[in-house]
Amino acid sequence: MPDVGFRYDRADLLKAVAERRGVGLSTLLRSLADSALASEGFPVAEQQYCLVRGGELITTSFKPSKDEDGGAWLPIENEDNAPFDPATCWRLKPLPLRLDGDRVVRTYPVVAKSQEHA
């Protein structure tokens, strides 16, 4: 992919938006690109799945295939553990996946920006 240049420096603006949203700069740029593609009618979202076999989480994939051992591919649902406001909160790295009945959940811890965290 070619290096993209701008007529004037937008790095500070992009960093400010990323900080406001509580994400890294690369995540912000991917999000902006996905939004632009979606607005033009291109499919961009990929669903991630988790192979569940005998009540155990085996592996994840964006392109599930038939499991020879009878496992089921379930979509991974993302959720925050508290309401998220990018102006006042940080979204931390996700906790390990968990099986919640017939769904697989990835939980993102949310903490206030004033709290100390590791």
Image: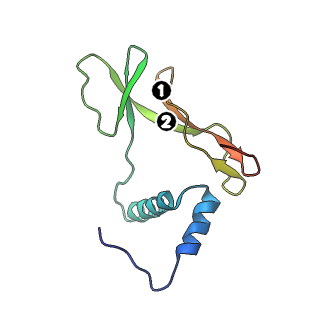
Instruction: Kindly check if marks 1 and 2 are in contact, taking CB atoms under 8 A apart as contact.
Output: yes
Q: Is residue 116 above or below residue 44?
A: above
Looking at the image, which residue sits at the far front?
118
- Residue at image position (70%, 58%) is 87
Q: Earlier in the sequence, mark 1 or mark 2?
A: 2
User: 69 or 19: which is nearer to us?
Assistant: 19
Q: Is residue 67 above or below residue 54?
A: below
Measured from the top left, where is residue 73 in percent x and y?
35, 27
Q: Is residue 62 left or right of residue 80?
A: left
Instruction: Check the image and report above or below for 31 versus 10.
Output: above
Q: Residue furthest bottom?
A: 7
Q: Position of residue 53 (x, y in %)?
A: 36, 18
Question: SS for tag 1?
Answer: strand
- Residue at x 72% of width, y 51% of height: 113
Residue tagged 2: 77
| Rendered location of residue 70, percent (x, y) | 28, 16
Q: Which residue corresponds to mark 1?
A: 103
Q: Tell me the kind of residue under disc 2.
A: Glu
Q: Is residue 52 left or right of residue 93?
A: left
Q: Residues within 10 Å of mark 2 (few under 14, many from 20)?
A: some
Q: Is residue 75 left or right of residue 63?
A: right
Dot 2: element = strand
User: Which quadrant is home to the C terminus?
Assistant: top right
Q: Amino acid at mark 1?
A: Arg
Q: Residue at x 53, y 77 (%)?
A: 10
* Residue at 55% in and 34% down: 95
Instruction: Tell which residue pokes out farthest to the right in this image.
Output: 114
Place of residue 59 in the rendered image (x, y in percent of width and height, measured from the top left):
36, 29
40 vs 111, nearest the viewer:
111
